[in-house]
Image (spheres, grey):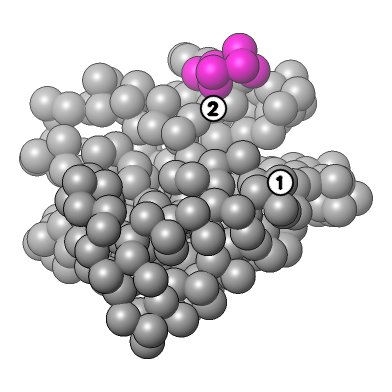
Amino acid sequence: MNALELINFGTKELRKKKINSSILDSELILSKILKKEREKILINLDQEVCKKISNRYKKLVLRRSRQEPIAYIMGEKEFWSKKFFVSQKTLIPRPETELMVEKLIKIFKKKKITVLDIGTGSGCILISLLSEMKNSKGIGVDISQKAILIAKKNLKRHKMQNKIKFLNKSFNDKFNQKFDLIVSNPPYIKSGEIKNLKEDIKKYEPRIALDGGNDGLDLIKKIIYKTHYILKVKGMLALEIGNEQFKKVSKLLVKNNFRIEHNIKDYKNNVRCIISTYIGN
């Protein structure tokens, strides 16, 4: 088969499963298999592809047809104009998280600070922040050892080993320092609502990174409480939150001696991140 025939095969199979991005996904899968840029394949569609490679392509198309996210099949996802390794042990980076990164860079770009990223996953938030904040350093923690292995691969990929450490530990463990900025994209979906998520999310993304307990706020409450001990007075806490959690999380922050500084809305006009300052006891 040639490249065009394979792309047509993949598109047809994915369309049957009502996958909207069927053409693009088919092209991306072929670019992965052939180890060539998608654009180069598209200007040479009559190139022949051997049976062994065709079979590998069809296996990946089958995975996508079962709703597995294209990012996991490709093994990477773009975030902040960088490519990050991902696996089913890490959340797939989302465009709305870039809005939080953008705001924090504006605030801290020229400062020299220490950053803690709680539940770092692929490490995309911390690596993106510190790629722009040239004078700063950070630590990313995650209770998933497999997530930390992916974060370390990304650290090496982006050559930032001198600025960042990734540790397989809980944020409840002891830290021997206090931070200027704590950032987190914690699990914030109510346990009872996991079943209502899209198939590709609930079947493939790590539940531990999605499930925020009965009210969706289990981890958020713990992070706010813990930051009393590991955030400097006048230090900042940036929390990504779920839809309609703004009022509850704001109350929790104010009750715990935080002053709300910024609310960041997503592309649908929902508040998805709160940045607050710890004003001390």
Residue 191 in view here: yes
Provide the secondary structure element on which disc 1 rests: loop
Q: Badge 2 is on which residue? A: 273
The answer to which of marks 1 and 2 sits earlier in the sequence is 1
In the drawing, does residue 77 fall left or right of residue 262? left
Quadrant into which the N terminus falls: bottom left
Residue 139 in view here: no
Task: Name the kind of residue labelled 2 in the image.
Answer: Cys
Q: Nearer the viewer, mark 1 or mark 2?
A: 1
Quadrant into which the C terminus falls: top right
User: What residue is rendered at 49% in x and 30% in y?
Assistant: 96
Query: Between 158 and 64, which is closer to the camera in this rendering?
Result: 64
Question: Magenta-highlighted stretch: main secondary structure?
Answer: loop
Q: Residues within 10 Å of mark 2 (few under 14, many from 20)?
A: many
Task: Name the kind of residue labelled 1 in the image.
Answer: Lys
Provide the secondary structure element on which disc 2 rests: strand
User: What residue is rendered at 44% in x and 45% in y?
Assistant: 24
Decide whether residue 274 is among the magenta residues.
Answer: no
Q: Badge 1 is on which residue? A: 18
The residues tagged by marks 1 and 2 sit, at their Cα atoms, a distance apart of: 32 Å
User: What residue is rendered at 54% in x and 18% in y?
Assistant: 267
User: What residue is rendered at 43% in x and 63% in y?
Assistant: 6
Q: Position of residue 196 (x, y in %)?
A: 85, 46
* Dot label at residue 140: none
Q: Which portion, as a residue range, is magenta?
A: 264-270
Query: Between 3 and 187, which is closer to the camera in this rendering?
Result: 3
